[in-house]
């Protein structure tokens, strides 16, 4: 797992500072370890493929090596979200989506995709 996949980073405006005779916002960065004590389980592509909204009740998708549970999302009913199907790695398909990767922030990470 890469470090950026494991950490949640907050930047907060803390006040103003004068640098080079210009006022600038000073930021405080807070880093939270999302998985402090346990490692995420490996999920194979065949395990992921079974969580497609048809074969098992769970609906999972992978993005950037992480597997997300999207079962509760009304946008993934029956394993389909517009032209995208659950049970697979969607990393290459995001470029065609009208949203950014921030959409995955609302879903629970349940494992890491074993490649």
Image (cartoon, rainbow, N blue to C red):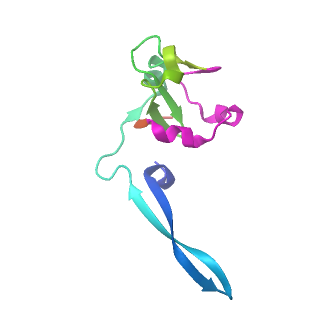
Q: Position of residue 31 (x, y in %)?
A: 43, 61
Q: Is residue 77 visible?
A: yes
Left or right position of 96 against 68:
right
Q: Is residue 79 magenta?
A: no
Question: What count of labels does the image hold?
Answer: 0
Q: Is residue 89 magenta?
A: yes
Question: Furthest-right residue in view?
Answer: 96
Left or right position of 13 against 42:
right
Left or right position of 86 against 30:
right
The residue depicted at 65 percent of the width and 35 percent of the height is: 94
Quadrant in the picture for residue 101: top right
The residue depicted at 50 percent of the width and 17 percent of the height is: 77
The residue depicted at 44 percent of the width and 54 percent of the height is: 7
Question: Furthest-bottom residue in view?
Answer: 21
- Where does the magenta region start and end? 82-107
- The front one of 98 and 111 is 98
Quadrant in the picture for residue 44: top left
Q: Position of residue 34 (x, y in %)?
A: 38, 50
The residue depicted at 50 percent of the width and 65 percent of the height is: 12
* Residue 19 in the image: above or below residue 98: below
Q: Position of residue 64 (x, y in %)?
A: 55, 40
* Residue 111 in the image: above or below residue 17: above
- The front one of 89 and 69 is 69
């Amino acid at each position: 797992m890469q470090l950026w996949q494991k950490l949640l980073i907050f930047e907060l405006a803390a006040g103003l500072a004068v640098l080079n005779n210009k006022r600038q916002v000073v930021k405080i960065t807070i880093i939270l370890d999302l998985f402090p004590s346990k490692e995420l389980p490996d999920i194979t592509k065949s395990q992921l493929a079974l969580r497609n909204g048809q074969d098992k009740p769970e609906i999972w998708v992978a993005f950037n090596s992480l597997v997300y549970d999207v079962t509760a999302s009304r946008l993934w009913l029956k394993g389909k979200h517009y032209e995208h199907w659950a049970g697979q790695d969607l990393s290459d398909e995001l470029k065609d989506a009208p949203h950014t990767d921030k959409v995955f922030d609302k879903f629970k990470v349940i494992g890491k995709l074993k490649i």
